[in-house]
Amino acid sequence: MAVETKPRRPKNRISADLSGPPAGKEDIRSLPATIEWLRREGLLLETDVEVDGDLELTGVQKHFDGSYPVLFNNVKGYSHARAVTNLFANMDIVNRYFGWQDGKERTKKLAHALTHPIAAEIVEQSVAPVQEEVITDDLEVNKWLMAIRHTVLESEITIGSGNSVVIGDYFHGGSHIGYNRMNFRWGNVGTFQPAPGGHMWQIMTEHYKDPKPVPFTMAFGVPVAATLLAGGGFDYAVLPRGGDEIGAAGAVQGFPMRYVKCRTIDAYTLADAEYVLEGEFYPQDKRYETAEAEKADTQGRFHFHPEWAGYMGKAYRAPTFHVKAITMRKRASKPIIFPLGVHMLDCHNIDTTVRESAIYELCERLQPGIVQDVNIPFPMTDWGGCIIQLKKRNKWEDGWARNFLVAAMSCSQGMRLAIAVDSDIDIYNMDEIIWCLTTRVNPRTDILNPLFGGVGQTFIPEERLTAGDKQWTGMNTRFEGGMAIDATMPYGYENDFMRPVYPIDRVDPKKWFDDSEIASAKAIMHGWVETLSRYGR
């Protein structure tokens, strides 16, 4: 691929300092407002060089995984659009969106938001930004919404950046928002993949035999708080059917989300989105996600769309979504699409942030005050695991570590690894976790497999293999269960697990070295030693 040599917007200022004041209310009301805030704060990589959704965008994103948001002002084949990626790739930047100081505060404040939603407001169609243009006669979806191909292993482009929005009766009076991948192989008709067990799967199952299709919308380029809540999945003990997920997004941002009545279907959608597909869901109209799978008449064998577990996804037969209208902001504003690259920190952080808080809230309901924080590091791959940090207050609370672990696994479809650790462990450092597993776990008594034969997820290859020669579908695979590991110290034996604490609070290196020498020396410290030096251990 030839390297582009055009100018890269030299006026763009990038700040190496990710700290700073939080975004204001108006800065997170819409995606364009957030982009402007990122630009002002020096937190945005921006380019006018054309980007192709076929491999180029995800290639650039992987180069900068975990770094700044990236804005592409020139998208090949979409003169009316811009594209942003890495919007959630760096959690220091995400914390600034919502005014969170660190991971622990984020977990607790988000857990509170999940249980204290702020009801959305309904606005008139005439003032809804997403309905500035309404298209009903040219519904070739891939013409309007940027489709991407992540890898050379995929045979077709796909749209995975759409948020299903279901409000009202079809969600038992509540509101749902979530991610669903689609492939519009038939113009205005595309496959719609509801994750088995997820909210859209529940809706599909309940209305499978209805004489009429289910009306709802797919929203693109939504406010950042809505994007965050859209990543919640399989957290249904805390975010059940009938809950108010969009109201929880309002609580996260501190003010109500806005709804608007759709133009062509009996439904509501997000007024401040960039694009919306108004359409109808046909549960029984199942079609193959790719032509390759259709030709072979085989599910779960041909590569399609990477999955959260870090492996290539597979093409299946999926229900279909039939588009009745496309609404959007004025083309002159070049509305922004957020084409989400899968198995990158952007995707991972969206999928896990709500999940961490939901697991925290679940444990708080079982027995409050013991759990301090929850983290799902990138190697645990979104829905694959969790690390729960505890602080026991008496001997009776010893057993709660296992109760929390088993509860988290049983309420989280397909979780394969759950670890409980003490409050002296930095749960955001994997070196610390490995040390804890090595030194605090009795392999005979502290490793549990509580859910053998339960409900799993076909997105993990090891589970697919249980289908043998059958097609890799949810009906044919079986869950091997997961590991729950109690890596906590028995209460009362803390002295036997005493960690050395070196006198960093009594020794100031400035006595021997100047600030530049200290900064230079610390800059090359990486891994566990850097963590230990901060705590003096």
Image: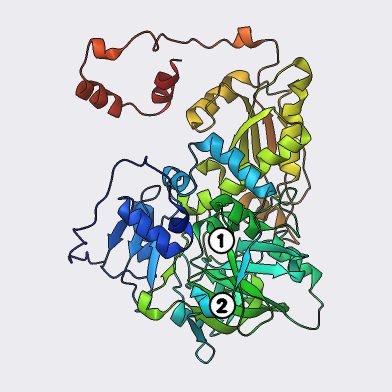
- Residue assigned mark 1: 313
The residue beneath circle 2 is 277
Determine whether the residue tagged by mark 1 lies in a helix, strand or loop.
loop
Q: How many marks?
A: 2
Above-or-below relation of 94 to 136: above
Q: Is residue 414 left or right of residue 250?
A: right
Of residues 406 and 434, the one drawn nearer to the viewer in this rendering: 406
Q: Position of residue 197 (x, y in %)?
A: 73, 58
Can residue 173 be seen here?
Answer: yes
Please say if 525 is above or below 289: above
Judged by depth in the image, the label closer to the viewer, 2 or 1, is: 2
- Identified by mark 2, the residue type is Leu
* Quadrant in which the N terminus is drawn: bottom left
Determine crowd level at label 2: few under 14, some 14-19, many 20+ residues with C-alpha closer than 10 A: many
- Residue 176 position within the rendered picture, expressed as x and y whole percent measured from the top left: 67, 62
Residue sitting nearer the eye, 511 or 144? 511
